Image (tube, rainbow, N blue to C red):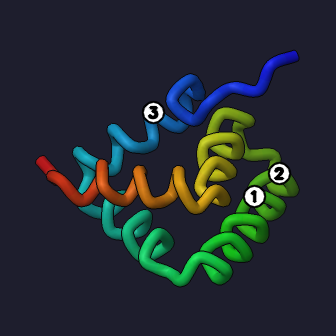
């Protein structure tokens, strides 16, 4: 099984689209992405565990989990900071 990139994860792309179109989602993601990398990674790990325990949709858990990566988090921040419609 090959590992997919964040760009190949449909839920991740949907999450970024939502953040670009919805100010509240944008604000929440920007707050998370603005944290220092170690703090952001820990918050994402806790959030993913919580979402799994609450039986959240796998698509959402996988999308949020992508933000553990420093590179992906930085790219996501650049994408959602460009515009909110």
In the image, what residue occupies the spot 63% across and 56% down? 69
Question: On the image, which quarter does residue 15 sit in?
Answer: top left
Q: Viewer-nearest of labels 3 and 1?
A: 3
Instruction: Name the N-terminal-most of marks 2 and 3.
Output: 3
First-in-chain label (3 vs 1): 3
Q: Residues within 10 Å of mark 3 (few under 14, many from 20)?
A: some
Please report contact status of discs 2 and 1: CB closer than 8 Å, yes or no: yes
Of 79 and 58, which appears nearest the observer? 79
> In the image, which disc is placed on residue 13?
3
Query: Residue 40's x, y, as percent?
Result: 61, 74
Task: Give the quarter of the figure containing the N terminus.
Answer: top right
Q: Residue furthest front?
A: 71
Q: CA distance from mark 2 to mark 1?
A: 6 Å
Mark 2 against mark 3, which lies toward the viewer? Answer: 3
Which residue is label 1 attached to? Answer: 48
Q: CA distance from mark 2 to mark 3?
A: 20 Å
| C-alpha gap between disc 3 and disc 1 | 17 Å
Q: Which residue is mark 2?
A: 52
């Amino acid at each position: 099984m090959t590992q997919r990139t964040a760009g190949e994860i449909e839920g991740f792309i949907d999450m970024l689209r939502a953040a670009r179109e919805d100010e509240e989602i944008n604000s929440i993601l920007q707050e998370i992405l603005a944290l220092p990398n170690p703090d952001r990674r820990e918050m994402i790990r806790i959030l993913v565990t919580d979402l799994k325990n609450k039986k959240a949709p796998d698509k959402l858990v996988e999308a949020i989990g992508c933000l553990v990566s420093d590179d992906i988090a930085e790219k996501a921040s650049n994408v959602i900071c460009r515009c909110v419609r």
